[in-house]
């Protein structure tokens, strides 16, 4: 059921434009001589990672490693999750040691997914740096974590955000409310 | 489509993953214990394998550890000797960051006359979450599951079941052959007394394999036909069409019994050697749950040859046991 009160924050065009702008920002801050990797937090971060890498290529970035990260085993709410917890694939088939990593997710809210992601990443190696990129920044942090690259921000903490992407949901749309 | 209508913090995230689950048609694991493979559905078996696939990755990293079972306590309760299974469960629990304690029947309170129930209840009182049990009596894990609130994993009960070993065998077949359905699987040895054979039979038939049980007629009861297996005492004939052959360990203590042929006769009729293997399909998979009696059920050239998956089974044992520990732990009453 589609509640009437939701409004569209980004439509398909808006999402494409936002990712493009994120790519430009990331590209302009790329450190020299350090191998770049883009890692998406499953599931929608994985989709965003692929799109971001496309945009980075257009800007001239080369040799980008792309990966996806499943954080199920690192979540701090595993006990509450119960049997719903499902271990999915982490696909990082490259050595993250010494890399400059862009970690990307759809929504940054409590910060707990990012905390879990950081723990998962450091178990795989020691990157040179990890930067966080998000499509939507929603207030309501429960941990001292902030994004380095932000697509759009919603002003109020109590506004739910629903991100849908063609690859995972069949439509490109970000709704709030 | 399911839309997120909740406000508030944690809930938004939950309904997000909820809609994802519905879309993927995700199966939800509901069992608190793993007592046997009898009664496990195809979906349950496949869910264990899919979960184990991901844990396989963890074992290949430089830091072979995830925090999923941090703060949980696993107790190994072994009332019967075991090296491999106990070590495998210990390592699996450690890779999930659980704490693990070991109990052996010898030199324990059992030898002082304590009952099984009391032993278990006392260990449970120390704050244990998961029991891994091996016992000489069939049904002991089921009994323990009834008298504790903990999760119970059967690590081999008498001649009844050894579910994790069979899961390892199934997982290894799936890995090496790409499927299980439709394969011809031959299990050779003392079928009557083998918990590995029983658990394998439940799992293999559930997943659509054709199973032939081979051994001395005295050790392959006709009753297994009712479980969907073919019975034979002609190994060469059975090997003809076999995609997989699982060689059971000959138990020395049984060789002296009346039902067992002489060792020489057993090796001649039921031992697998290179000469015999030559007549089978070139890509036949040779399995053994270990420990091997070299020169008895398997000749060394076969055990160490290219068709053998014996060490791979041991490696896969970790991923399977991690998956089982993880899945059971997610289920509460």
Image: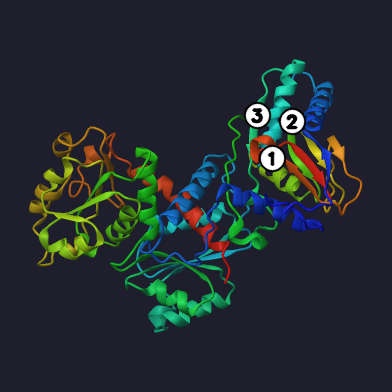
The answer to whether marks 1 and 3 mark residues whose Cβ atoms lie closer than 8 Å is no
> Which of pointers 3 and 2 indicates the residue nearer the eye?
3
Q: Do badges 1 and 3 share one subunit?
A: yes
Q: Is residue A66 left or right of residue A110?
A: left
Marks 3 and 2 on same chain: yes
Q: Which residue, as the protein is rendered here, is positioned at the far top?
A: A60
Residue B87, compared with residue B63, is above or below; it is below
Mark 2 — on which chain does it sit? Answer: A
Q: CA distance from mark 2 to mark 1?
A: 25 Å
Question: Quick one: SS at disc 1?
Answer: helix
* Circle 1 residue: A44
Q: Residue A128 — which label?
A: 2
Contact, CB < 8 Å: mark 3 with mark 2? no
Comparing labels 2 and 1, the label whose residue is closer to the camera: 1
- Circle 2 residues within 10 Å: few <14, some 14–19, many ≥20: some
The span from disc 1 to disc 3 (Cα, nearest Å) is: 14 Å
Against A17, is B289 above or below? below
Marks 2 and 1 on same chain: yes
Residue with the mark numbered 3:
A66
């Amino acid at each position: 059921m589609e509640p009437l009160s939701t409004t569209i924050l980004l439509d398909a065009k808006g999402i494409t434009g936002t990712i493009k702008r994120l790519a430009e920002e990331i590209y302009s801050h790329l450190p020299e001589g350090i191998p770049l990797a883009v890692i998406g937090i499953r599931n929608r971060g994985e989709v965003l990672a692929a799109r971001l890498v496309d945009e980075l290529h257009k800007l001239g970035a080369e040799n980008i490693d792309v990966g996806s990260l499943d954080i199920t085993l690192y979540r701090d709410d595993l006990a509450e999750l119960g049997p719903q917890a499902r271990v999915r694939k982490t696909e990082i088939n490259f050595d993250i040691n010494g890399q400059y990593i862009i970690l990307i997710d759809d929504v940054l809210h409590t910060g707990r997914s990012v905390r879990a992601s950081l723990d998962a990443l450091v178990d795989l190696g020691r990157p040179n740096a990890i930067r966080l990129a998000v499509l939507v920044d929603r207030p309501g942090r429960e941990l001292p974590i902030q994004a380095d690259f932000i697509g759009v921000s919603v002003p109020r903490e109590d506004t739910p955000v629903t991100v849908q992407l063609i690859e995972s949901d069949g439509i490109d749309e970000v709704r709030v409310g | 489509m399911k839309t997120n209508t909740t406000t508030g913090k944690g809930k938004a995230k939950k309904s997000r993953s909820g809609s994802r689950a519905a879309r993927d048609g995700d199966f939800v694991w509901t069992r608190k214990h793993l007592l046997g493979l009898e009664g496990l559905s195809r979906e349950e078996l496949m869910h264990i394998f899919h979960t184990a696939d991901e844990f396989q990755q963890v074992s290949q990293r430089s830091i072979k550890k995830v925090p999923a079972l941090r703060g949980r306590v696993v107790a190994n309760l072994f009332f019967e000797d075991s090296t491999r299974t106990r070590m495998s469960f210990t390592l699996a629990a450690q890779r999930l960051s659980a704490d693990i304690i070991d109990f052996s029947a010898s030199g324990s309170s059992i030898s002082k006359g304590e009952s099984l129930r009391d032993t278990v209840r006392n260990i449970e009182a120390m704050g244990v979450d998961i029991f891994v049990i091996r016992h000489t009596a069939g049904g002991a894990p089921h009994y323990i599951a009834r008298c504790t609130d903990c999760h119970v994993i059967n690590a081999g009960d008498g001649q009844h079941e050894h579910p994790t070993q069979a899961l390892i065998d199934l997982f290894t077949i799936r890995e090496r052959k790409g499927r299980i359905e439709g394969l011809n699987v031959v299990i050779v040895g003392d079928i009557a007394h083998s918990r590995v054979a029983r658990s394998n039979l439940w799992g293999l038939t559930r997943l659509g394999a054709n199973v032939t049980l081979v051994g001395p007629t005295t050790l392959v009861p006709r009753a297994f036909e009712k479980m969907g297996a073919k019975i034979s005492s002609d190994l060469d004939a059975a090997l003809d069409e076999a995609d997989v052959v699982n060689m059971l360990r000959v138990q020395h203590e049984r060789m002296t019994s009346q039902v067992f042929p002489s060792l020489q006769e057993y090796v001649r009729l039921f031992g697998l050697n290179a000469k015999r293997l030559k007549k089978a399909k070139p890509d036949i998979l040779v399995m053994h749950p270990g420990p091997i009696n070299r020169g008895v059920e398997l000749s060394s050239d076969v055990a160490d040859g290219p068709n053998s998956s014996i060490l791979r089974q041991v490696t896969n044992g970790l991923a399977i046991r991690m998956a089982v520990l993880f899945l059971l732990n997610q289920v509460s009453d």
